[in-house]
Image: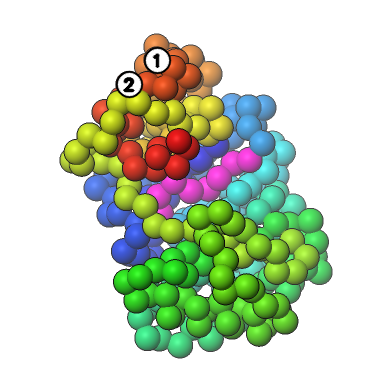
Amino acid sequence: MNIEISNVCNLQCSFCPEVIRANKLMDVQLFEKVIQQVTPLTELVCFHLMGDPLVHPKLAEFVAICEKYGAKIFFVTNGVLLKDSNHELLLSPAFHQVNFSLHSFFDNFKGKDPTLYLDKIFTWTQDAFEKRPDLYINYRLWNLQDVRGSETENVEMLRRIENHFNFKMNSAVDVRKQKSLKVKNKLYLHFDTEFIWPSADLPVLGTKGTCYGLTSHFGILADGTVVPCCLDKEAAIPLGHVQRQSILEILDSPKAMAMLSGFKQNKLVENLCQRCQYIERFQ
């Protein structure tokens, strides 16, 4: 369950497309309304679709609402805004997993020393080992084998992780086959490669295929619009609005059911899906 509490990010990564929608921070009342409805439906609530959740000034209130209703949080951040004021917050028992997208650092600060950035994340991680040994932590480090040249800095980031945690990774890892590697306790390295985000402006790639949208996940944008998947960043497939309908009504709508039926029959009924490169990963 992807709840976009903010479509605003403090960085502009080359692998993350620009948000065309107006900047928006979800308000606390809307968030609580959503959490009340989705907690019985989902295992995890992800504070992300676009934007970085650490941008939101009322993040602590959102975490408290999740604690109140028993919702477990899946958290994705670039980690640049990690600081003393939110250090303890991310150790709340409401968090199930925290992901740091480390590859975003050099993508935005090419040639800059990452020591201070990594020290904050390493310190928080060590604290989590002691206070939240059940908490899953992912260091995302994509494009380690990028042929465009960014691999050098990402490999340097990997070396610093190895040195800090006294860990050695096999340099021949194939990220197409192995996406995750345990470092220590419940800390993992997560590997992947970039992909092209779907857009109505792209050419049609095909009308056959399937997806996990509306099966394993769906999303709610910062303004309350429900979308079928985490890649529908501009609400190209709006299914409804949580201020006007219940989430169950929206998920049971003719448009949502037509998409699900199409996926089960290997048919892509929506224009955005027909232009989605990510779907090729499920073939």
Position of 113 with respect to 59 (left or right) is left
Instruction: Specify the farthest residue to the front.
Output: 172
Please state which of residues 221 and 166 is positioned toward the viewer in this rendering.
166
Q: Is residue 234 visible?
A: no
Is the C terminus in the top left, top right, bottom left or bottom right quadrant? top left
The three-letter code of the residue at mark 1 reads Ala
Position of 236 with respect to 121 (left or right) is left
Write down the region rendered in magenta: 44-51
Q: Residues within 10 Å of mark 1 (few under 14, many from 20)?
A: some
Position of 47 with respect to 69 (left or right) is left
Secondary structure category for the residue under label 2: loop
Position of 220 with respect to 75 (left or right) is left
Determine the image quadrant of residue 238. Answer: top left
Instruction: Specify the farthest residue to the top.
Output: 254
The structure residue drawn at horizontal position 19% and vertical position 38%, both measured from the top left corner, is 203
The structure residue drawn at horizontal position 35% and vertical position 60%, both measured from the top left corner, is 15
Q: Which residue is mark 2?
A: 269
The three-letter code of the residue at mark 2 reads Val
The structure residue drawn at horizontal position 53% and vertical position 48%, both measured from the top left corner, is 47
> Is 49 part of what is drawn in magenta?
yes
Q: Which mark is residue 19?
A: none
In the image, is residue 279 above or below residue 130?
above
Please state which of residues 96 and 269 is positioned toward the viewer in this rendering.
269
In the image, is residue 280 above or below residue 164?
above
The structure residue drawn at horizontal position 44% and vertical position 69%, both measured from the top left corner, is 145
Q: Which residue is mark 1?
A: 258
Earlier sequence position, callout 2 versus callout 1:
1
Q: Are marks 2 and 1 in contact (CB under 8 Å)?
A: yes
> Is 25 part of what is drawn in magenta?
no
Where residue 258 appears, as percent x and y from the top left, is 39, 15
